[in-house]
Amino acid sequence: MMQVPLAVGSLMEHAERFFPKKEVISQTHDKLHRLRYGEIGQRTRRLMSILNELGIQHGDRVGTLAWNHHRHLEIYFAAPGMGAVLHTINIRLSPEDIIYIINHAEDKILFIDEDILPLIEHIHTHLKTVEAYVVMTDKADLPETTIKPLYSYEELLSTGDPTYHFKTDMDENDAAGLCYTSATTGKPKGVVYSHRAIVLHSLALGLADTAAISESDVSMPVVPQFHVNAWGTPFACTWFGTTQVLPGPRFTPKRLAEFIERFKVTITAGVPTIWLGLLRELEQGSYDTSSLRAVLCGGSAAPLGLIKAFEEKHNIPFYHAYGATETTPLVTLSRLKSYQQNLSKDEKLKERARQGILVPGLQMKVVGDDGEVEWNGKEMGELLLRGPWIASEYYKDNRSADTFKDGWFHTGDVVTVDEEGTIKIVDRTKDLIKSGGEWISSVEIENAIMAHDAVFEASVVAISDDKWQERPIACVVLHEGMEEKLTKEDLLEFLKPQFPKWWLPDDVLFITEIPKSSVGKFLKRELREQIKSQLSTQG
Amino acid sequence: MMQVPLAVGSLMEHAERFFPKKEVISQTHDKLHRLRYGEIGQRTRRLMSILNELGIQHGDRVGTLAWNHHRHLEIYFAAPGMGAVLHTINIRLSPEDIIYIINHAEDKILFIDEDILPLIEHIHTHLKTVEAYVVMTDKADLPETTIKPLYSYEELLSTGDPTYHFKTDMDENDAAGLCYTSATTGKPKGVVYSHRAIVLHSLALGLADTAAISESDVSMPVVPQFHVNAWGTPFACTWFGTTQVLPGPRFTPKRLAEFIERFKVTITAGVPTIWLGLLRELEQGSYDTSSLRAVLCGGSAAPLGLIKAFEEKHNIPFYHAYGATETTPLVTLSRLKSYQQNLSKDEKLKERARQGILVPGLQMKVVGDDGEVEWNGKEMGELLLRGPWIASEYYKDNRSADTFKDGWFHTGDVVTVDEEGTIKIVDRTKDLIKSGGEWISSVEIENAIMAHDAVFEASVVAISDDKWQERPIACVVLHEGMEEKLTKEDLLEFLKPQFPKWWLPDDVLFITEIPKSSVGKFLKRELREQIKSQLSTQG
């Protein structure tokens, strides 16, 4: 067989040749753009020639601090398309972390949205390797700044070469992308995506039994392009000629709902927090969401109530997925097997609330204290992963050895696996609660609490206990107007039939908000600190 | 990212773990078997251990002369699964060709169906490298023979090790399969499939926009397992947990129709001849074919009338595909783009009768006398292909250089490409008719003739002409009962409005059968010989 490398640039070439008329609809700070893949391809080629002129060489890192829009999409292909590395930076991190990341990655050029410019003005003197800044606007919109050298994206593009060639003859194991993930302790850790990984992962996203991304879809990624490449959807959607709707900077649930109706979005992806927000919007407004065939939800476990609300109230198919920055990210997706279609409505929903089965192409192993656990839906163990789109290390980071051992990625997620091979995340290894020598899953109690109609969100954390070692405490945010209508006793009564007695939280604290990370995950460490002070005040 | 090779064995491992309850339904000479992937996996492991015991080593060729059934499926995974090479041999070739192929491939062991045994008895003294023969039956059914050493498949399996491990750490470019293709001149030519090619091709078959093979499908490959691995469907279907229906030896259209109804087949694949036969059966009998969501047709161009009959008379979606032994084989598939759904019924049908657009992962180029042709649906050129599941050479064959040039596989197929990138095969380079310095597509005239209700099949070939260099002659087989109801003049009158005058055949010969190759393709070379003698007799 021919030795043809899997190359990210060839995905855009395919779109240009076979789907030149299909559209990318993109919201930027000033307006809505509609471009065809024919144009996007040419603009990407112009951008590659500009990167080349600016001295970017094979393997150099090209940083982006940007929202979801077409210019960001163009860099997605231009950087790896000319041999460089696309480095998407999470704009929600602290300035210190952003400085660390840019210096650690040794970014040579930064592409930034104009609303990010104040941040960069604040930190740019600390950036050691950046040689040029590009603001992703027209020249006319270029804000005044002292940063130098600084270019307008559109002005640069106007001088680019629309016939510049994609580089598709590199080693497919060469770096194409880079993304940093927050660490529980210490600075963020970088994950390098190879061309091979991105192309294989794109194929995985197109499989009929996973996300089934198709030319006939209209995809709106709500998950940011700076978070694991918007879960790889821009790569797959471009390759397959899918219409893309990129919702731009600082979108609201209202904009999302409007875009779904207006552009007949068929598939969208994001974290539970986003879908909770959209759900509120759908319940307040009146939107036609009948085009939606799939809402993909990942990042953290979706409460059963959320799935139920989408599926039963709004008739929107809701798919639970699981992955991580280290896994490109798709690992599992909750789709029923054909013979599971015979289950009762409740059983189906329960099955769908799990994280699903492994995507073809990966290998998994669930390891407890005594080796691999049985697939009986009960035994808990840490999920270990292996495969061509699973990281083998953190980028230049000596913490790699803690996570990548014996050829496996140790996810830190505790799961059960049932007879069907369906995994269910029960906790993070570090969030499991050990009470009297037995494990309690904080996530299972959270999900049960969140299934209560009055509850908006909930988090369960461990506090240390002299007798039992650790005990669970529930922190609960109620829906607006529900305050004082649900008592601690009511809630414990509600939980009682669902769990062994010793799983029930020792206390329930009603709070106004659960602290979240930049990507919407519960920050249990912060919550534990908060509780400690609250409990000691009470005490 | 991890360096994990794409390995054929891991596909069966995935099926064993995630789809152990799903079934393979298999017809053998004596009965219908129903096995689950759990069992198929264990039997494959037993078989690997047996191959190992019989001395098969990494890279050794394991030959099969067998129909579509579960034992053949097990060897599909056992041979590459233990590091050897699955060599499927076309049982319809001449004994001379089969001897050549086995000796050229240096097969070390042969797995044969019991009805093939007489052939092997006839030729086995000529086989230079075969050390063992396995007849794919129970011991009780083992026919008497003088061939030695000869084993019963089931007896061997009973002593195998069901815990034997799949080898998944080889170089993914290592050979996993081997298949010979007939050559126009000379002996058959071998194509080696790597693990990488088979795994990537399987992903391509699972894409929502290609065959979309899914766990929820019931797949019945009618294309033989000895013909380009039944178009790769056994690999993809096993991986994705698809129910497989393998129709066994010497099936009839009646058996196919019955199996479709009985097992609720959703997807099936084969050459036009098969579908012409099935169509007749569907029109004679009364079958429920409502489960079918896709009939894939490849190998040679399907006449418009065939597509129309399936889609309009029987409401069965019919997909035209294109590929070759050298291409693993999927290259294009005719699926309408979303915006083409607005075309009229006739325009849609016309579009669907083309071979479709390129599958993601491959590259194509269409080259005429003056370089790459324009994509305007008119200019003709030879189709050139490149990609990770396209062959780079014939196995140990000095004819390779004629076909593999400058990094491209020269298909020998002449195509046009329209603005959508949809290819249409207009001819084989060697079957194009050159009349008065202009090209005439024999395939286009054939399709037009076959659209006539009275016509069963038709082939158009060139005869040499003093004045025009070459002129087309049509050879036509009429439907039963239609003989003498359609004259040469009627047919030419029917064609007249559809073509330029100089494209019209100089003569129409009514014949009883068109000579076909072992895989159902028209043998135009033989037909030309036949005509020559017929015309000279007439003259």
Image: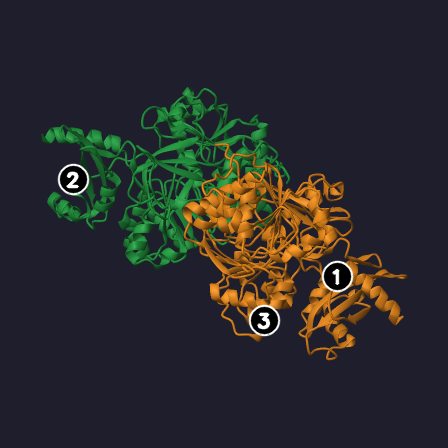
Chain colours: A orange, B green
**Left or right of A479 on screen, residue B247:** left
Quadrant where the C terminus of chain A sits is bottom right
Residue A77 on image: x %, y %: 53, 45
x and y percentages locating residue A167 in the rendered image: 51, 37
Q: Residues within 10 Å of mark 2 (few under 14, many from 20)?
A: some
Residue A404 position, x and y percent, is 71, 42
Circles 1 and 2, Cβ within 8 Å, touching? The answer is no
Say what amino acid the circle numbered 2 marks. Trp
Residue B317 sits in quarter: bottom left
Graded by Cα atoms within 10 Å as few (under 14), some (14 to 19) or many (20 or more), the crowding at tag 3 reads some
Residue B163: image quadrant is top right
The residue carrying mark 2 is: B502
Query: Furthest residue to the left?
Result: B539
3 and 2 marks on the same chain: no
Q: Is residue A506 left or right of residue B80?
A: right
Residue beneath disc 3: A281
- Please report the residue visible at 53 percent of the width from the left and 39 percent of the height from the top: A6
The residue tagged 1 is A442
| Element type where label 1 sits in the image | helix
The image shows residue B177 at horizontal and vertical percentages of 49, 33
